[in-house]
Amino acid sequence: MSALLRATGVGKRFGGLSALGEVSFSIPQGAIYGLIGPNGAGKTTFFNLLTGIYTPDEGGFEFDGAPLPGAPHAVCARGIARTFQNIRLFASMTALENVMVGRHVRTRAGLFSAIFRPGSERAEERAIRARALELLDFVGIAHRAQEVSRHLSYGDQRRLEVARALATEPRLLALDEPAAGMNSTETAALGVLLQKIRAKGVTILLIEHDVKLVMGLCDRVAVLEYGRLIAEGPPEQVQHDPRVIEAYLGAEAGA
């Protein structure tokens, strides 16, 4: 498979601290790709660099054969969406409204249309609503469309975040610890959902501490330690790498 995303020599410093150093790997089109490592390894820093929240001090990214722009809105427009380790929904808006907000990144209406609401703008808004309902159904929470997001269960809030990210029509979906706080049943359901998303042609980059989920779901896995890439490859290779076992997996490498 051809590479959809290439990270080449990506580095980031905060003062005298090197958070990432010369990280390079490629994510194939259509893959579920895992990024793992102990706390403080630089995983979320990598996500923040990829999505334009931080600017790399060294290296950069190439997406679908072209350099990736730096601003978050431009990254999203190119086809990269993300979720966050800490849920960031619009707490006072309904589930449906949250997804509609995500969808507006692909709309054409401008200030004039927003003020005077011509027929074309109203038709577009109906289409946004319909697509948002489809995505809520896709992630399994259509029956909660009119509920205020802060009243949803933790697992449903996670699903809502995924639906909102999908509303931007990403080619690459970057998920920052989506299984955090989930029980085993919810985690298994998340794995099924991620397979469904991949089946729709979306490539997935996954940060996750649930080793069982990562090793059972991902096509390839990269491992960071202290901001450095220490291993990369198929799950069965990575989980038996002595450096990875020592740095992160320990007994979980399991035999």
Image (spheres, rainbow, N blue to C red):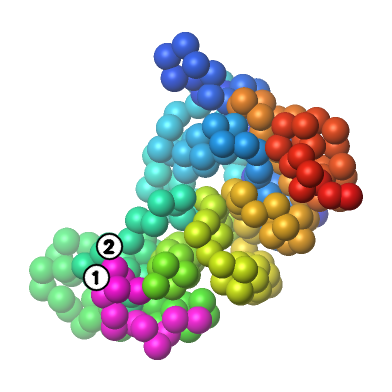
The answer to which of 126 and 165 lies nearer the viewer is 165
Residue 201 sits above or below residue 138 on the image: above
Residue named by callout 2: 90
Magenta-colored stretch includes residue 156: no
Q: Residue at x 34, y 82 (%)?
A: 145
Residue 178 sits above or below residue 140 on the image: above
User: Quadrant where the N terminus lies?
Assistant: bottom right
Using a 10 Å C-alpha cutoff, classify the residue at mark 2 as few (fewer than 14 neighbours), some (14 to 19) or many (20 or more): some
The answer to which of 225 and 102 lies nearer the viewer is 225
- Looking at the rendered structure, the kind of residue marked 1 is Met
1 and 2 marks in contact (CB < 8 Å)? yes
Magenta-colored stretch includes residue 145: yes
Q: Residue at x 42, y 85 (%)?
A: 142
Report x, y in % for residue 186. 57, 71
Report x, y in % for residue 122. 23, 81
Give the magenta part as a residue range: 140-152
Quarter of image, res 201? bottom right
Q: Residue at x 39, y 72 (%)?
A: 153
- Looking at the rendered structure, the kind of residue marked 2 is Phe
Secondary structure beneath label 2: loop
The answer to which of 167 and 77 lies nearer the viewer is 167
- Res 169 seen here: no
Report x, y in % for residue 82. 48, 53
Quarter of image, res 143? bottom left
- Res 144 seen here: yes
Residue named by callout 1: 93
Report x, y in % for residue 118. 17, 78
Secondary structure beneath label 1: loop
Residue 240 sits above or below residue 155 on the image: above
